[in-house]
Amino acid sequence: MLSVDEALEMVLAGIERLTIESIPIQEARGRVLAGDVTSAQDLPPFDNSAMDGYAVIAANIQQPPVTLTIVEDIPAGKAPQKTLQSGQAARIMTGAPLPPGADSIVPVELTGVDRHSDIAPDVVEIFQAVERGAYVRPVGEDIQQGEIVLSAGHLLRPADIGVLAGLGYSSVEVVRRPRVGILSTGDELLLPDQPLTPGKIRDMNTFTITALVEEYGGEPVPLGIARDTEQSVRDHLNRAIEESCDLILSSAGVSVGAFDVVKTVLEEMGAVNFWKVNMRPGKPLTHGYVNGIPFLGLPGNPVSSMVSFEVFARPVIRKMLGLDWGMQTRTVRVGETLRSDGRMTFARVKLVEEAGDLVAYTTGTQSSGAISSMVKADGLLIIPAGVTEIKPGDRLAVRPFFFDA
């Protein structure tokens, strides 16, 4: 049976970064930048005032109080019309350009003028000296022309959208989001709004996997619920081909039961690379291709499905986006005795801070069907293969759920 590392290497072997598309910056939050963004201008593009106040020549006000003549009123958005001479000042608002000749700003609070006046006074009395350059935001202080502002592979955040707008970008080139077909299988499955009847359960995997695909940057393509017949599975997989999916995620139907038909259809429509991995939960995991499309058959139990997604599908989506696909972990102290069967185990744990240390405790039952163990969890504690007992105080790696995608 393949180890987790061996299986992951096979899964990722044929995965490449997807193509590039141009989108409006309003739609770019959370997308992956396809190329470097280099500024074609300085930001700010001109010297401007950081305060409401008065533009002055600093040398004129070093022995306050000083009275200066007001020669211009400069609101934000207006270009100065006059050059400041010795003994003169200009009323100026935050963000407005400095007039030629001025080198400093005196905030209105340091003057004898009512800051709420609609009309600029004829003179202003300055009560406190300021240094040359005070309260001035010089040209290029934030970003200089030719500077690489954002690098390829960057996951765009709200501040990044703002800087793109400030630099004059109305659109940006990003990596195309992977279209991920999501298929649940099983005669027992019902939709959430359908009443339970004997032998039936509601489909959770479609909804958890859809949310995970969205969280990690993919575009979910719902394929519905396939019943436990080869023809139903075949029809749903053909839909994934028609929808131009980049990845297909199926849950259930990949074990060894009499009604587990997904692997049979997969062999017919493409290829099967493996169908078991030495991990817990998630042993019955299938990898292959459907008409050239990468396929991951996740286990049917909700926890196994989510853990298998985290270990295998998440890296595939991130590699398609050109992102680092490695599992982010941190080392924590284990707070209780844990036992494993020797497979690499991903235990659902709560993370509690104790005496400045992060301590992991299980969320109770570790049954692969108990989704409550994931609801209560802060992360997955990774028990290495070959380890059967963990004692309180031992230190292990954990994959926290609160890491960025």
Image: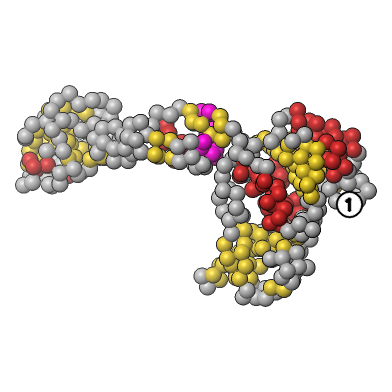
Residue 195 in the image, given as x and y percentages of width and height: 85, 42
Which residue is nearer to you in this view: 392 or 288? 288
**Visible in this render: residue 102?**
yes
The image position of residue 145, as x and y in percent, is 32, 34
Q: Residue at x 61, y 71 (%)?
A: 395
Total numbered circles:
1
Say if the magenta span includes residue 241: no
Kind of element beneath mark 1: loop
387 w.r.t. 90: above or below: below
Give the residue drawn at x 78%, y 47%: 273
Q: Quadrant of the N terminus?
A: bottom right
Residue 52 visible in image? no
In this picture, residue 311 sits left or right of residue 31:
right
What span is colored magenta in the figure?
22-34
- The quadrant in which residue 346 appears is bottom right
Q: Is residue 31 magenta?
A: yes
Which quadrant of the figure has residue 77?
top left
Residue 40: which quarter of the image? top left
Q: Residue 177: x percent and y percent? A: 61, 36
The coloring applied to the image is: secondary structure
Q: Is residue 314 left or right of residue 368?
A: left
At horizontal 48% and vertical 36% (from top left) the residue drawn is 35
Crowding around mark 1 (Cα neighbors within 10 Å: few <14, some 14 to 19, many 20+) is: few
**Residue 391 image position (x, y, % from top left):** 67, 76
| Residue under numbered circle 1 | 256
The residue positioned 86% from the left and 37% from the top of the image is 268
The amino acid type of the residue labelled 1 equals Val
Left or right of 116: which side holds 316? right
Out of 124 and 27, give the one closest to the viewer. Answer: 27
Q: Is residue 63 above or below residue 397?
A: above
Relative to 192, 20 lies left or right: left
